Image (cartoon, grey):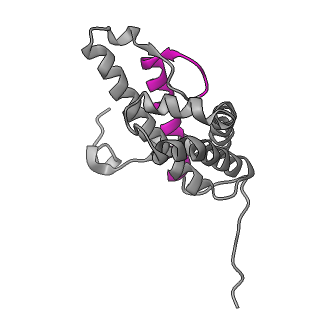
Amino acid sequence: MKMTWSQGAHPSAGNRNGIRWIFNPYLLLAFRLLLAAIFIYAAVQKIGKPQAFAEAIRGFGVVEYGPPLYIMAIVLPWIEIFCSLSLVTGVFVRGSALILLGMNALFLAVIANRAAGFVRDGTPFMKVYFDCGCGFGPTYAWKKLLEDAAYLLMSLALLAAPRHRFTVSIRRRSS
């Protein structure tokens, strides 16, 4: 059977049905709960050890010394907790998704940069192994990059979803 462009086969038709499944309310709820669990666990691992977390941050070469390093080590876990609780309760889901999207984009960039340093020193990429400081212990860089990319995509789906179910809706009363 020959399909004509009038039947929707044109490549520029902008058919979004191929990704509609990503906006299934139960899948979005699973994304919210999974991201919340991951980031709560990671935050709890770092919250009581700001000095150790500051040293892990320093290892990435983004912030070397001084107050910005220690402020980041203290504040970042609390942002993760706040965003996680927001995702669980369903309050400010898009805002939390946006923050997590930005954080995961930054995590991807700094982990890729650190892995590239190991590769420049002669370590094969698939064998680059270090503790990124996220609270889950040492791992392979490729594995961490895939995990963070998955978290970024889940955050993007939450941000881009046309609407969310299982949330608390805050509406202003009109006077």
Picture coordinates of residue 64, whole percent (x, y): 40, 37
How many callouts does the rendering have?
0
Q: Quadrant of residue 4?
A: top left
Above or below — where is 6 with respect to 132?
below
- Left or right: 107 with respect to 75? left
Q: Position of residue 170 (x, y in %)?
A: 70, 68
**Between 50 and 154, the one nearer to me in the picture:** 50
Residue shown at 60% from the left, 57% from the top: 163
Q: Position of residue 38 (x, y in %)?
A: 64, 33
Range of residues picked out in magenta? 135-160
Query: Which corner quadrant of the image does residue 93 belong to?
Result: bottom right
Tell me if residue 50 is in the magenta stretch: no
Q: At x 54% / y 47%, what residue is drawn?
A: 71
Q: Position of residue 128 (x, y in %)?
A: 40, 12
Question: In the image, is residue 56 above or below residue 68?
Answer: above
Q: Is residue 157 visible?
A: no
The residue furthest front is 66
Q: Please indicate, yes or no, whether residue 84 appears anywhere in the rendered image.
A: yes
From this viewpoint, which residue is outermost toward the bottom? 175
Decide which of 4, 27 is in the foreground and name it: 27
Image quadrant where residue 74 sits: top right
Q: Is residue 47 left or right of residue 21?
A: right
Task: Tell which of 138 and 90 is nearer to you.
Answer: 138
**Looking at the rendering, in which quadrant would you find the C terminus?**
bottom right
Classified by dominant secondary structure, the portion drawn in magenta counts as: helix
Q: Quadrant of the N terminus?
A: top left
Query: Any magenta on residue 152?
Result: yes
